[in-house]
């Protein structure tokens, strides 16, 4: 079975209301033309209008739901509603909170840019992104990945110096997507 196309933003605006201050979506009352029968239309319009939509988190922590038979992520629907077009790439949650779907917290990002904004790994021993302990050299090592290649930033006796080197390099190489923690 072929994938259903994404609903057009005009159709989304007829079915959903978005609150930019809260980042939440709500179902609107629908016209009978959206349904196969008048009975289904009446049942739907008694049950859903005014209720919050796309409230179920998926296994990655993003809110998602289904509209017109198509499963979609809430932040992508919000982008389409706000800008009148689906995002070209991935969407980056600037504050890394996957439930914060306020439009001011969303930005179109390539896969590479989205990875630049990832926080330090949970198994990171230094507490700083791009900094790890070199057992062989017994020093803190700072590295950054740029366009798929690791760049060595130096060895440091102090973890804070290594973190500062990464922070400076991240600002230079990653710009607005730089993240140091």
Image (cartoon, grey):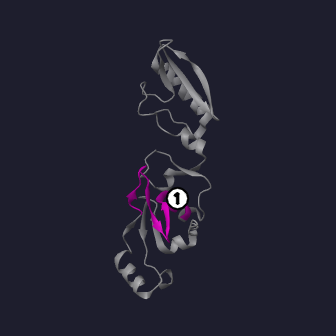
Residue beneath the point at 46% across and 66% down: 66
Q: Quadrant of the N terminus?
A: bottom right
Q: Nearer the viewer, residue 86 or 137?
A: 137
What secondary structure is marked by label 1? helix
Residue beneath the point at 55% across and 36% down: 178
Above-or-below relation of 37 to 102: below
Mark 1: give few (<14), some (14-19) or many (20+) Cα within 10 Å. many
Above-or-below relation of 64 to 171: below
Above-or-below relation of 120 to 131: below
Q: Which residues are magenta?
A: 54-80
Looking at the rendered structure, the number of numbered marks drawn on it comes to 1
Q: Position of residue 121 (x, y in %)?
A: 45, 33
Q: Position of residue 159 (x, y in %)?
A: 46, 19
- Label 1 sits on residue: 76
Q: Nearer the viewer, residue 71 or 105?
A: 71
Residue beneath the point at 48% across and 58% down: 73
Is 154 part of what is drawn in magenta? Answer: no
Identify the residue at the far front of this view. Answer: 1
Q: Position of residue 18 (x, y in %)?
A: 46, 65
Residue beneath the point at 49% across and 24% down: 131
Is 55 part of what is drawn in magenta? Answer: yes
Above-or-below relation of 123 to 111: above
């Amino acid at each position: 079975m072929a994938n259903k196309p994404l609903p057009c933003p005009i159709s989304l605006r007829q079915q959903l209301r978005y609150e930019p201050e809260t980042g939440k979506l709500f179902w609107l009352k629908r016209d009978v033309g959206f349904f196969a029968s008048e009975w289904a239309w009446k049942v739907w319009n008694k049950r859903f209008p005014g209720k919050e939509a796309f409230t179920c988190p998926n296994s990655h922590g993003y809110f998602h739901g289904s509209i017109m038979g198509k499963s979609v992520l809430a932040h992508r629907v919000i982008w389409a509603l706000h800008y009148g077009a689906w995002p070209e790439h991935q969407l980056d949650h600037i504050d890394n909170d996957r439930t914060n779907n306020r439009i001011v917290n969303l930005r179109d990002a390539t896969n590479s840019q989205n990875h630049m904004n990832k926080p330090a790994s949970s198994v990171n021993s230094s507490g700083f992104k791009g900094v790890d302990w070199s057992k062989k050299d017994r020093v803190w090592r700072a590295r950054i990945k740029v366009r798929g290649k690791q760049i060595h930033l130096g060895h440091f006796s102090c973890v804070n110096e290594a973190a500062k080197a990464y922070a400076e390099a991240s600002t230079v190489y990653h710009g607005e997507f730089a993240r140091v923690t």
